[in-house]
Amino acid sequence: MSAITSALPLPASGRVPLTLRVFAALDRKAWIALGVFLALALVVVPVLHLALPPENAFHVSTYAITLIGKIMCYALVAVAMDLIWGYGGILSLGHGLFFALGGYAFGMYLMRQIGRDGSYGADLPDFMVFLDWKELPWFWLGSDSFGWAAFLVLAVPAIVAFVFGYFAFRSRIKGVYFSIITQALTYAAMLLFFRNETGFGGNNGFTDFKRILGYSITAPETRLVLFGLTAIALAATLVFSAWLVKSKFGRVLTAIRDAESRVMFIGYNPLWYKLSIWVISAVLCGIAGALYVPQVGIINPSEMSAANSIEIAIWVAVGGRGTLIGPVIGAFTVNLAKSWFTVSFPEYWLFFLGLLFIVVTLLLPQGLVGLWKKIMSKKQGAQA
Amino acid sequence: MKKLLTTLLLLTGALCAWAGPDPALVRQLAADDNSDKIAAIQQLAAAAEPGTAGILQAMADDSLYVLDDKLFVFDGENTLDAFSGETVELPEGADTITVNNRLRGELANALAALKLFDEDRAVRLNAARELQSNVGAELAPVLAKAKASESDPHILELLTTAYAKATLQDADPAVRLAAVAALAEVQTPAVRSLLLPLTDPANEADKLVREAAIQALKTIERSLAWGDTLAAVFSGLSLGSILLLAALGLAITYGVMGIINMAHGELLMVGAYTAYVMQSLFRSHFPELIDWYLPAAIPVAFFTAAAVGVLMERTVIRWLYGRTLETLLATWGLSLILIQAARVIFGAQNVEVANPSWMSGGVELLPNLILPWNRVIIIGFALFVLFLVWVLMNKTRLGMFVRAVTQNRPMAGCVGVPTSRIDTMAFALGAGIAGLGGVALSQISNVGPDMGQGYIVDSFMVVVVGGVGQLAGAVWAALGLGIFSKLLEGWAGAVIAKIAILVAIIIFIQKRPQGIFALKGRFADQ
Amino acid sequence: MNAQAALIDQPDGGDSATQLGHVVTGELDLSHGVALYLEDITVSFDGFRALNKLSLAIDAGELRCIIGPNGAGKTTMMDVITGKTRPDSGKAFFGQTIDLTRLTEPEIAHVGIGRKFQKPTIFEQHTAFENLELAMKTDKRVWKSLMAWLSGDDRDRIADTLKLIRLDGEADRPAGLLSHGQKQWLEIGMLLMQEPKLLLLDEPVAGMTDDETMRTAELFVSLAGKHSLVVVEHDMAFVEKLGGKVTVLHEGSVLAEGDLATVQNDQRVIEVYLGR
């Protein structure tokens, strides 16, 4: 949070173009790391997947691509959660909702792309045929257009977050109160989506996708494109977030987190600051959800369960909140552990996850990043 | 008992000149074709000659024998000739008449109709009651006959209803009209569904009858509306009492101590599983006392849940006082561990916890208002727990210490309150009360590892709406939420009602962020 | 929000409004010489009257001390002026035209009222420099903050203020690491960066050394004239050093008013302080 260490020698004051400021948001090491990450995701992984035969030791399997792609979506959600929790001090237990809204918005498009290849061979999605509906409900209008779906992915989470956030922040609901209310909101939405009549496939949600933009959704090339797009989205989110938290906006945000009344008495209206970061965070979740659905191939209301939203918080806590790389590390650590546990020791996964919640809050309040920093500073102290 | 009754009936039959039922009809009972048998049964019942009951009862008991054109009744000791009533030897080769389920139904009806002429008022009353639910047009003549000879006004009322039901499909519109008029006086949901088809011209050709039916339905609906509303209020009270039991412990841990305990639902689960374990223990060790397992489970559940609470507080929560968001995450972790532990110990499936016999059944206040005992008892139990908590918090030293620590921790410490021990004890108390709530829940809902998850949102809503730190607030919020959601469920369905309630709470919090009973002033902000 | 938007580009003070010859609601108008005007303010919490028909007027450029025993309503009065607490009844005006009871906290900060809390509240995670930067008078809406970049003049102003509050050596240290007295000074510095017309200071010298206290007094005296100051303090030496008029609050209303010597000899004041 101290003086800005930039990759470029920027003038300390005066007018600086925005692009340079964004560039200055990350230091040289961070830019290099980001470049390596993108090169891996966009070049190395596709080559290893397509060019090498499956029996080769360096072949990257479809399973691995799907898993890493999924976790990158989670990492994006974790960064979004960190913006609101780590920097804004607001613990949301409703981020699963925004993720699911983005997923459902894009899922509608994918459902329409099935066309007549569904099991009933009808123009309507299978679940509507099953419910004996004769035509699409109004909110499905335009869902066959990719552009409209992409717009909904951004707009629906944004609108829901804005309306809810406006009322919640205006009445100064804070801390645990806010967390519980967001949990209730998500719970209500889950109940709503579980109903068949709501028009989003009830319990089963959306699945059995066939195509995206006309391309087969299971083709290796399509998978790799989605994988690459997810990597780009994650990288872009990191750069954007870095710029955001290093701007004066970011400093006001952390100031609100630490002493809200002081912020008000020096003339900032916390409502709009909280609302901005809340909506930004929700939209990022929506994007992650939209990238998640075509890769994983299913979206259903259980994405909105309380457990899912709280798990997002633990990714952030494990990595280290208030840092941007922390949530990414946390999302990868926890989810890789999850996929290992659920295969090897399924009955111990919940014990492990439960313990993780406790250990991190009790012993690692700064997460893995904080632990790393502590170790490094001790090392330096020893050398000195 | 049945046999004795048969004998008695036979004797009375035998005494009243054995001219009895029409022999041709009796013979028809042994016909090959089932519909012939049914016709015979119905006609015999309609004629209601003395002695018919004995024969039909024997047929229902599979002790009516046939050989050629002779029929014999075996009453358990002796064989009687069905026509003369004389004791005879059962001839070789006589076979029982086969009775299938449809015939059994007809026989039961016919027997009930015949019992309408019994000497004993209780027998007649029972028979009349039995005929309220399943009565067909074929019984109309016998009901008319019984009505004419009945003197008891209560039985007469029942017979009038049954007769009206039986004649609702009569060919004569005047008879139907009379039936509708009679039924209009009887305001039950069953009558409503009987009359409903008559408002449709497709089922009822006569305009007058239709109009009468519409009028009658209006009257009935008006009177039923009362019962329905009361029933909704009662189930609301019942839901409210459950919410209260779930939320009371939380009102202490969160409301008073400021600890967010996401594992609260799992403490309910601990209580419910304790009830299950007690039930199993009683089944295997004291099967004769099985009905007492529930009272025995109450203290055990309290202390088990309290012990789990102490463990939680000592190992995790005490290191996080004042860091509410962290507490939220850590207790969520605890809840995951408890859920998985329950799965490992008891299996992932729901376990079966039965109501003790004294809790089953219910009390009928109105035709459409039945209060099940288990619900009534749980409402009482909730009041008892509430009283207990009130006494503990307001009348004991522990309660005073807890309130002191809540208001000013350092000062309480300075004047010698052992604050850390008080924290543990207060948390244990909250956990124990959750355990009590779990015992109550085991009586009305599924007991399984995930059961607690369903209550956590609801119980937090109760505490939030009621206002933090306020027991009275929790009570009003629980009852209000319970009744409101049940009334809403009546016309919007359960899911929409639930969503509406949650949205209403979110809006309510806008207006009164501090809950119904707000703390005001300098401390409101802390 | 309208009020806030209208106030953001407002030139120094409210002189422009009076020059136009009419009164514009929402713009600061000190032309009648009164900076703050409270009339019959009543606030009660659960039946307890924290303020009971309190009336008080502070002149433009005046330095006023408020004293009174615990529970006299001093902090509640500040809460009312800064919009934290809404009065049950009564009027609170800033200048001639600004109705404080209708504005939110940030709006009140914008019209030119700065407040220092009893317990120093600064942003402990931010550096002293950043604390001042955040407090600096500027457009404080979200979009402007996103695009904000300090100009050379801004940096100079912050540096000047740092020097004034003697924290120029600590500019890049997280404020949480400062001493108690330094924190008090930092908060005063933040107040100055806001360029308020009226400063409310709740026990500003609590926890300061005698030396620091005297320097604070000098600073306040130098501020008076350009700004109006309301200082709540228990430290009588400090109050004496400030000079100025003293108001004694008791049970939510004004008990006595005048210079320190008069007030100290007032029989009722002696009773309140010593009688129980």
Image (cartoon, rainbow, N blue to C red):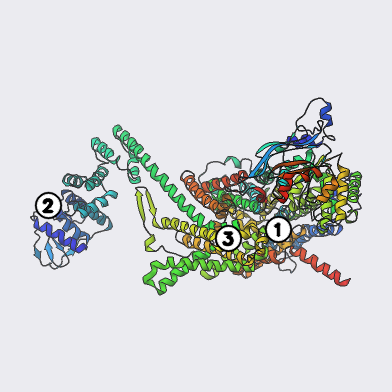
Q: Is residue A308 left or right of residue A320?
A: left
Q: Which residue is mark 1?
A: A69
* Few, some or many residues within 10 Å of mark 1 (<14, 14–19, 20+): many
Q: Is residue B78 left or right of residue A35?
A: left
Snapshot quadrant of residue C31: top right
> Distance of mark 1 from mark 2, alpha carbons?
87 Å
Same chain for marks 1 and 2? no
Residue B22: assigned label: 2
Q: Position of residue B295 (x, y in %)?
A: 43, 66
> Distance of mark 3 from mark 2, alpha carbons?
86 Å
Q: Residue at x 60, y 41 (%)?
A: A139
Q: Secondary structure at mark 2?
A: loop
**Type of amino acid at the residue the image marks with label 2:** Asp
Q: Secondary structure at mark 3?
A: helix
**Type of amino acid at the residue the image marks with label 3:** Met
> Is label 3 or label 1 in front?
3
Q: Is residue C197 left or right of residue B457?
A: right
> Is B256 rendered above or below residue B148?
below
Residue C47: assigned label: none
Q: Which residue is mark 3?
A: B400
Q: Residue at x 44, y 47 (%)?
A: B233
Q: Secondary structure at mark 1?
A: helix
Q: Are marks 3 and 1 in contact (CB under 8 Å)?
A: no
> Distance of mark 3 from mark 1, alpha carbons?
56 Å
